[in-house]
Amino acid sequence: MINKYYLLLFLLIWSLLIVKGQENPQAGVVSGNIQAIGQYYQEDTLINAALPEHLYGFNGFANVNYQKGNFRSGIRYESYLNTLEGYPTTFNGTGLGYRYMSWSGDGVGVTIGNFYDQFGSGMIFRAYEERQLGIDNALDGIRLTYEPTKGIYLKGMIGKQRYSFDDKLTNGNGIIRAIDGELNLNELLDSSNSWKLKATLGGSFVSKFNTDNNTTLYNMPKNVGATCFRMNLRYQKIRFSGEYVHKINDPYPDQDKNFNYIYKNGEGLLLNLGYSTKGFAIDFSAKHMDNMLWRSTNVNVGPTDLLIGYLPALTKQHTYNLAATLYPYATNFYGEIAYQLDVLYKIPKKTILGGKYGTSVALNFATAYVPERDFVSDMGSSRNSYTTSLFSRSDSILFQDFNLEIKRKINKKVKLNLNYFNFVFNDDAVKVAGYYKMIYTQIAVLDLTYKINRHHSLRFETQAMWTDNDKGDWLFGQVEYTFSPHWYVAVLDQYNSGNSDLNKRIHYGLISAGFINGSHRFSLQYGKQRAGVFCVGGVCRAVPASNGLTFSFTSSF
Amino acid sequence: MKKILIPLLAFFLFACDKIESPVAEEYGKFDWSFFPGDPADYASNYYDIANPQNEWGENLNEKGILLEDYTGHLCTNCPEAGLIAKSIEEDSSLNVIVASIHASIDGGFQETDALFTNNYETEAGNEYVRGSEMNGFLGNPMGTINRNDGGLSNSVWYLKSQWVSGVNDENDNDSLNINIQIKSFNFSQTNGLYVHTETSVLNDLTGNYHLILYLIRNDVISPQKFDQGIIDTNYHHHAILSDNINGTWGTQIINGAVLKDSVIYNDFSYQLPDPAIDLSYNVENLSIIAYVLNRDNMRILQVVNEELE
């Protein structure tokens, strides 16, 4: 009941501010955006398409913000009526899902209500929203920032995490307390900006309190803390960053007995070294991550629920359909040793290899292994379960991705984009594809854009996947016609050409069209969508097969 | 600056609970090193200590009588007492459970030598005959019958000639105020033994009640002295008390008033002697006797036993 009064008070104040802002533009600025996606589901037993009894799913939200000077406030209204298939069912109903007020001045900033934030790479703390995945772990509480002098940035916050939405925002029970400090040595000590070395140092401490897990078998820690140190260095064209995070005993129930209620400390080390100059860049990253599942509750929840920390993925985020949705990398919460190398080179124009306009070559290699673990028999006592050493990996590969991208403008009308992907995917460990064995696959992509004239262009995209594993080979083709600035239409087909079950060699045809007018975009699509996995940054969501009509609308003001 | 630093330091110091003993006390009093695997598996595969109420069915055990035969392998009158005890036990209508306790006040009849190599004394057995709580022990062979006070001079001690009548008298008193069930699991890899008991209170009680577990070797072949210096080197010693699993006076389960229908669960871990060293500790030769004792008057309210498998 008290919460309702607070909400009403908030809305009243907020409405007055909006009205005031609209009456007099000098009084403030109102901005916002909206996104709405609706899908009408049809029966399609051939692809085992999702067919909910409500037949129509809808996800929508709108942000409305008000700003005047150093004061900001905003709300997000959300509707899931009913939730789109594959989206977390913890998103349901319609109502306010986000509200905040903030103000700043004299080096001090205050936010009350919901907010997103991140310390360093996010390993120790990341409150963020990834709407496509159904992730929203916004903090609901108070955040203070303070800049005592230029170059010193302090931050402190306390709050609860968003857990679910059921006609209203529902927070988890756990409380998060977090502080972060960052020193920009150049701003602090080099007022003349003469140093060639640019250096930033940072440190964080995050603690959670929860009593959700009432197991009588184990002494559960109610307060669990994690500490993080990070640095960013840049010397002319070379840059280096390093971040280390350490978390004390934080046991969770787990089906794997080696990880069930283990009290081992967690740790993560993320290193990155890069060099870039005109036309060339190389970047190497290494990651050691062990036992860094870090939630604000110690009971079983959905895989993306109530995560305090984010485990960064050392892989390239692919966008081409077959590469992105069949065997995408998913972060292993138990731990992994991962490396990534990125090389970008632009072959100069007017050379034999570079052609008239130059050619961009991007090479990426990423690999992740299970850490070497020496298991110890201590489950009846200290329950550390195993020991590990930094960057000591086992022979058990989780994922490997080699990919090459060549972009070339052939002439004024034709642009070519060639891609090659080679994946090694351990589905027994990653458990994304449902095959639960090793998958070896190669993918080739040809993406050709033909500019007919200033307003009309055609894009042809063809993809092929070869594999002897899982569902076998796939083919993909798409033709997209754009008549700018307003319209586009596209037809695509995916075909599971190599499925060992001849009855499952199915065409997934889809037609789509859209209208774009400034910041407004409206699109329609109709057809079959195959089951797959959608991942962003190593966090994944399974998407069921479906058949039907989908519309979407996005706009901002 | 101090105003900032002190609260900050406090935040760092108190915002973490470092757990030195992850396994909860109730669960952790078990020695899990005897279990070949993760203790969490024990709950799913054997017995869920955290939810014992789901582990037991209806208790159909009838009232039992514990006949303790205090004996010695050099005691020439003891074999006859042993025969009496065994014959009483074999009368299933009496529901008697025998425990042969090798003990005497001064260690007489218990000595070992080149022929009598085994010392069957136990710390608990010696305490029972030597301590102040069960006064009146004269010498081997003597016995107790549910440790009631119907023995010599209203003590708990019965001469062997009184055992039959004593048991019959005890059997006539069929009131049962407490009942017991036992479950046990043993693991040959570690010789580990886990014992779980359910004690049901059948009538309102007040007092100091203990649950005591005996480890019994059912049959041990070793020398026994008879009259006229005869020694039977292949004598079958029956139901030898080999150790008290939970100590001389066991585990206090009630102290004060307890209401009818109360249920008490207890769990015990124990490492059995290695049968590779002493064959008589082969699990097929072992059983557990569990009884509830009123320590205020030494009376045993109920006794049950379970063969190990």
Image: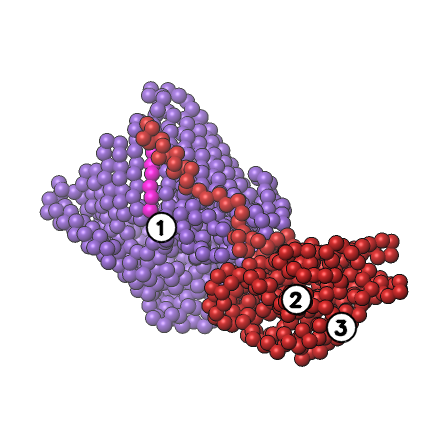
Chain colours: A purple, B red
Residue A409 appears in the picture as rendered? no
Q: Which residues are magenta?
A: A154-160
Q: Position of residue A261 (x, y in %)?
A: 52, 52
Q: Nearer the viewer, residue B118 or B228?
A: B228
Residue at (30% x, 62% y) in the render = A93
Q: How packed is label 3: few (under 14 Cα within 10 Å), some, or many (20 or more)?
A: some
Which of discs 2 and 3 lies nearer the camera? The answer is 2
Using the rendered image of the protein, determine whether residue A229 is visible from the camera's viewpoint.
Answer: yes
What residue is at 76 percent from the left and 62 percent from the top?
A: B140
Q: CA distance from mark 3 to mark 1?
A: 74 Å
Q: Residue furthest front?
A: B153
Q: Residue farthest to the bottom?
A: B93
| On screen, residue A432 above or below A409 | below
**C-alpha span from label 2 to label 3:** 22 Å
Q: Is residue A156 magenta?
A: yes
Mark linked to residue A75: none
Label 3, on which residue? B84
Determine the image quadrant of residue B104. Answer: bottom right
Tag 2, which secondary structure?
A: helix
